[in-house]
Image (cartoon, helix red, strand yellow):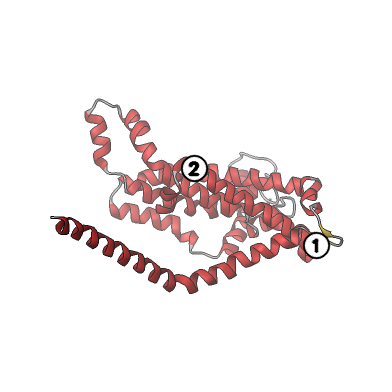
Amino acid sequence: MAADATLPRAQASRAARARQHGQWRLLLLAAPALLLLAVVLLGPILWLSGLSVIGPDGLTLANYERLWHGAFLYSFRTTFELALLVTAVCALLAYPLCYLMARVSARAAALLMLCVLLPFWTSLLVRTYAWLILLQRRGIINGWLADLGLIDTPLRLVHNFTGTAIGMIHIMLPFMVLPLYASMRAIAADYMQAAASLGATPAQAFRQVYLPLSLPGLAAGAVLVFVLSLGFYVTPAVLGGGRVVMWSMQIERNISLYGDWGAASALGVVLLAVTLLFIWLLGRVFGLEKLLAR
C-alpha cells in the first residue's frame, strides 16, 4: 500500500521537473530576443537617464528643475490637454460606431471598418497636409461655410489648438476603434437577451451589462490613443504652425537648435515616466491582463 501511495507522488514530481525543464528550454530559446530588447530598449533609456542628471560640474537635477518653468511648463500643459482631449473625443466617436458595427451584418461591419482603416493606410504626412488644405482660411471648409452664408469672415481653424486637435482626432480614431470593436464583438447577444428576460429595459441592460463588459476594450483604446498622443510630432508641427508646442517638439528643439542633450533627456525621461504611470493606473483599475488581451 505504501508503494502504491508513493507512485503517484513520484509521477507528479517527474512531471513537475519535466515542466520546469521545458520552461528553461523556452527561456533559452527566447534569450537572444530578450537580449536584443534589453539592448534596444533599456540601453537608450539608461543612456538618456544618465544624460539627464549629468551637468558640467557632475551630477545635478538642474535639467529637471527647468522643466517646471517657462516654455517647458507651457508645453507640458499643452501636451496633456491635447492628449486628454483627443482621447476623450475619440472615445465619444468610436463607441457608437463600434456598437453599430457589432450589431449589423458582417458585410456592413466590414464596410464600416474599411471606412475607418482606409485613411489609416494613407501616409501620416499626406493626411496632415490634407487637413491643412481643408482647414486653412481659404480652404474648403471655410469656403463652404461662406457659400452657405453661415460666416462672414474665415474661421481660424488651423495653426492653433483647434486645428491640431481635429487632425490628431482623425489620425488617432482607428487606434480607439480596433480594440473597442474587438471587445464588443466578444460580447454575446445572449447577455442582453438574458437581461431583458429578467425585466431590464434596453437602457438598463446596456448600462448594467453591455457597458461594463466593453470597458476593458475602451480602456485599451484609451491607452493607445493617449500614449501615442503624448509623443506626437508631425501633426502638431504642421497644423499647429509653431503656436502649439508639444513636448516632442521641445525635445527636437533642444537637440537641433541648442544641442542641449541634458534638457532633452530630462523631457524624454519625464514623458516616459508619465506614460508608464498612466498605463499602471489603468492596469490597476481594469486589470493589465484584460488590457493586453484586447
* Crowding near the residue tagged with mark 1, few <14, some 14–19, many ≥20 C-alpha atoms within 10 Å: some
Residue linked to disc 2: 284
Query: Dot 2 surroundings within 10 Å: few (below 14), some, or many (20 or more)?
Result: few
Label of residue 93 in the image: none
Q: Position of residue 207 (x, y in %)?
A: 37, 32
Q: Amino acid at mark 1?
A: Asp
The kind of residue on which mark 2 rests is: Arg
Q: Is residue 122 or residue 187 the one in the foreground?
A: 187
Outermost residue toward the front in this view:
2
Q: Residue at x 51, y 44 (%)?
A: 282
Q: Which residue is mark 1?
A: 260
Q: Residue furthest right?
A: 57
As helix, strand or loop, the secondary structure at mark 1 comes to: loop
- Using the rendered image of the protein, determine whether residue 2 is visible from the camera's viewpoint: yes
Q: Is residue 176 left or right of residue 264?
A: left
Where 196 sits versus 115, above or below? above
Residue 243 percent across, percent down from the top left: 74, 50
First in sequence: mark 2 vs mark 1: 1
User: Is residue 95 rendered to the left or right of residue 229?
Assistant: left
Q: SS of the residue at dot 2? A: helix
- In the image, taking residue 271 as reference, residue 68 lies left or right, namely right
Residue 172 % position (x, y):
53, 53
Who's the residue at 59% across and 43% down the image?
84
Q: Nearer the viewer, residue 139 or 259?
A: 259
Question: How far, Cα to Cα, is label 2 from label 1?
Answer: 37 Å
Looking at the image, residue 222 sits to the left or right of residue 44; the answer is left
Can residue 167 be spotted in the picture? no
Foreground mark, 2 or 1, reads 2
Camera-side residue of 20 and 57: 20
- Whole-percent x and y of residue 167? 59, 52
Q: Residue furthest left?
A: 1
